[in-house]
Image (cartoon, rainbow, N blue to C red):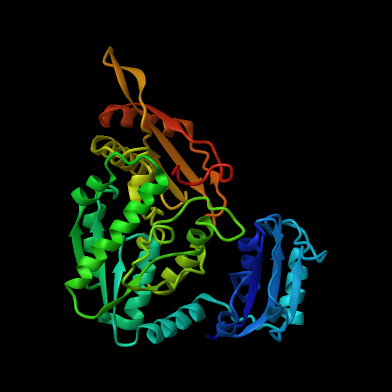
């Protein structure tokens, strides 16, 4: 690994991501690890120049105040504690935290400012080659930013040892399966296997209303599909995934309760037959996009709308039905078309539609209706950990409302979600 590293140990702080980003902003690589790291895991971390013990309100676990083991203090590099046994507190954003961190990282630790995207890519290619060797990798390729960047990294590292599998689970946006096949098979010359599994997924999800259960069904079924595809191929031993750091932190740690499980974190079956390859798991979304640009991916792919692994399955709230799923898909297509026409494509980080599992009374063509509402969501964020709501012009909202209520079957209302993150999450489920 070319970069020096500062290790942040999680001692109950809710600001670990912000601290890690502050260090990376100085040009020094940083990773977050649990407080009870094993000695061999600590020794395996490359080029560690300093350790930060980051305490906070979640430091007491099961009635006991947690701490790192003595071997962390004895590791042989400078150690500083924030909010640790009366030590320094991490100041609020906008204050002189920056100088305190930079003094420790650059002064005390003498870490080199060699963290940049190209060095990260070079390191990951080296690590992928070391992990995979001459064996083969199966990649779940949704066509979203994360999986596309992983695909580009793996192609650069191992070439034709990679087989990409695109699963149409019936929960994709309008026209998406066709676009993925065109971009990756025809334009990028990837080994791409297309699997039509629409009925298989929707049958398993029938009647399931709990969002966590839906995510785990979708994640588990994905793995089963990959296992079946792997059996058709020779020598597949690895599963590539586009896991990024917000996926991991939102799925919960020993000191932070889960916001929600992600299909590639909380939904993996225990009897997984593959070893995972997850080169982006320590990156935030903006850093993933920067990697994509550096790898030469087209802007249309790098800045593509974020899309959850479970797809429209977490935007068709409650138990999924095919007619309501289609309402989500068609309404989403209208929203994206109108945002593009209004010049908002690429300017708003994420926008989508949600259809809940309840109906309301309305009127259409002078006749009483009892149909679903469509909820519009448009947010801006840098790292997906917090988000603000886009101030969409009212005239545009009116136009979108008119189109959705006129063109989407089974819908009679359109609502706009004004909730930032926190207190809401970006997705509804």
Residue visible at 46% across and 78% down?
121
Left or right: 45 in relation to 106: left
Q: Quadrant of residue 273?
A: bottom left
Who is closer to the viewer here, 322 or 180?
322
Q: Residue furthest top?
A: 366
Q: Residue furthest right?
A: 86
How many callouts does the rendering have? 0
User: Quick check: 421 above or below 86?
Assistant: above
Residue visible at 59% across and 70% down?
33
Please say whether residue 186 is visible from this viewpoint. Answer: no
Q: Residue furthest front?
A: 63
Left or right: 260 in relation to 276: right
| Image x and y of residue 134, in percent | 30, 87
Residue visible at 83% across and 64% down?
86
Please say whether residue 93 is visible from this viewpoint. Answer: yes
| Image x and y of residue 264, in percent | 40, 61
| Image x and y of residue 107, in percent | 76, 80
User: Quick check: 332 above or below 385?
Assistant: above
Who is closer to the viewer here, 120 or 292?
120
User: Quick check: 193 above or below 344?
Assistant: below
Quarter of the rendering occupied by the C terminus = top left
| Image x and y of residue 252, in percent | 53, 57
């Amino acid at each position: 690994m070319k970069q020096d590293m500062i290790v942040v140990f999680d001692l109950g702080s809710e600001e670990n991501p912000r601290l890690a980003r502050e260090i990376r902003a100085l040009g020094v690589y940083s990773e977050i690890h649990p407080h009870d790291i094993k000695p061999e895991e600590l020794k395996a971390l490359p080029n560690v120049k300093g350790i930060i013990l980051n305490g906070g309100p979640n430091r007491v676990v099961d009635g006991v105040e947690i701490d790192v083991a003595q071997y962390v203090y004895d590791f042989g590099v400078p150690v500083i504690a924030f909010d640790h046994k009366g030590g320094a507190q991490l100041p609020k954003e906008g204050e002189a935290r920056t100088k305190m961190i930079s003094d420790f990282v650059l002064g005390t630790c003498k870490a080199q400012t060699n963290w940049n995207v190209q060095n990260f890519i070079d390191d990951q290619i080296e690590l992928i080659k070391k992990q995979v060797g001459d064996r083969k990798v199966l990649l779940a390729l949704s066509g979203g930013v994360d999986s596309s960047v992983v695909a580009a990294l793996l192609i650069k590292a191992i070439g034709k040892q990679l087989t990409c599998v695109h699963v149409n689970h019936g929960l994709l946006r309008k026209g998406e399966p066709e676009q993925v096949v065109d971009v990756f098979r025809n334009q990028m010359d990837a080994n791409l296997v297309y699997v039509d599994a629409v009925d298989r997924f929707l049958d398993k999800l029938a009647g399931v209303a709990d969002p966590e259960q839906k995510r785990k069904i979708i994640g588990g079924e994905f793995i089963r599909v990959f296992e079946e595809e792997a059996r058709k191929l020779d020598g597949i031993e690895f599963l590539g995934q586009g896991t990024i750091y917000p996926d991991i932190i939102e799925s919960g740690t020993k000191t932070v309760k889960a916001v929600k499980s992600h299909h590639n974190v909380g939904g993996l079956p225990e009897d997984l037959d593959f070893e995972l390859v997850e080169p982006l798991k320590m990156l935030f979304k903006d850093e993933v996009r920067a990697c994509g640009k550096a790898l030469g991916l087209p802007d249309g792919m790098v800045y593509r709308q974020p899309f959850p692994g479970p797809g429209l399955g977490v935007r068709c709230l409650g138990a999924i039905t095919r007619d309501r799923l289609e309402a989500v898909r068609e309404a989403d297509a209208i929203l994206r078309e109108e945002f593009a026409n209004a010049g908002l494509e690429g300017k708003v980080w994420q926008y989508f539609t949600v259809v809940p599992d309840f109906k309301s009374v309305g009127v259409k063509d002078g006749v009483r209706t009892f149909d679903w509402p469509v909820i519009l969501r448009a947010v801006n964020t840098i790292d997906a950990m917090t988000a603000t709501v886009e101030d969409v012009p009212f005239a545009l909202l009116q136009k979108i409302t008119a189109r959705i209520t006129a063109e989407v079957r089974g819908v009679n209302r359109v609502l706009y979600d004004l909730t930032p993150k926190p207190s809401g999450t970006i997705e509804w489920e």
